[in-house]
Amino acid sequence: MQQRIMVLVLILLLGVFSPRAIEARRVHGFDCSLCHQTVSSSPVPYMTYNLCLSCHAPGNANTYELTDGGDSNPVTGTFASGDASDAMGSYPDGVTPGDQTSHFWAGSDDIWAGSDDIVAAAGAGSPADFLYNFGWSEGKITCSRCHDPHAAQSNPSLLRMGAGSTDAMCLDCHQDWNQTGNHGHGSHPLYADYPTLAAANPEKFRATPNNFGSNGGISLVDGVKVSCSSCHGVHFADSDASTVDGPTQTLSVGDGKLLKYDGPSRENPDHAPAGGADADSQDRRSRYCEPHLYQLSTAGQPGRHL
């Protein structure tokens, strides 16, 4: 009995005097005052008010001291205000889009009527997961709507729904595009087991995605699934198969569609499959695809595509 009590006391002492030994190390393990600053009421330029851009700004490769005495990794993911996509016409009048290689991050109530995380043109509604729905970001599109600034290093992308949850997060917002078995009506269908589908229908599907020797990144999620990130990036994607996507890469000016291959406006015959197929129908390449028909044709009204 006495030995058991001594063990409990030792465990309690370790918890009191060595809290950092058992605390998960955070990506943003800085002194709180680095981010939690006094808010100014002065107006700031559109899309530059975001606190995240104070550090994640072009040209900043600094490291920052962590509270455990170590240093953070250098800043690599940086954004200019014009990097945000304008595919949905999100920019206000008078603001010119830039490279458009990132998901839009500056939604506020003066852009769309009502709750601006409900955007029919993007197949998007308010997310269902409670992790999105708190704080001043609720009903808006901000960095902290998707990223948890206090996440542990085991979740390096700071995703609200946990490490590896990119596609689950996409579909929690873009609910109208979460379709399968729909034969392409409304949106490109998603498949949980593409290899099995392709094996059963070899006349219709390739066994694996083919980027035709380019730097395109069309791929299966987890090696088997057709999902959002099979074709789209969230950040640092320029709809250009001649470039490698990513935070440290040199990207082209994008079209805001964040495709991992040539987008609809990208005319590059070098990225077409060999074999002399008709240039207007070569393998239904992404520049000719209309993967999200978000408004089906009705009487007298044509359908609309992303």
Image (cartoon, rainbow, N blue to C red):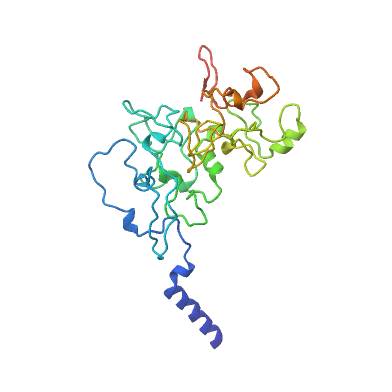
Q: Residue furthest top?
A: 300
Residue 33 drawn at (x, y percent): 31, 57
Residue 14 drawn at (x, y percent): 47, 76
Q: Is residue 301 above or below residue 258?
A: above
Q: Is residue 2 left or right of residue 273?
A: left
Residue 149 drawn at (x, y percent): 42, 52
Residue 285 drawn at (x, y percent): 61, 25
79 or 300, nearer to the observer? 79
- The quadrant of the picture occupied by the N terminus is bottom right
Residue at image position (51%, 84%) is 6
Q: Is residue 41 left or right of residue 157?
A: left
120 or 231, nearer to the observer? 231
Q: Quadrant of residue 89?
A: top left
Q: Is residue 156 visible?
A: yes
172 or 287, nearer to the observer? 287
Residue at image position (42%, 29%) is 86
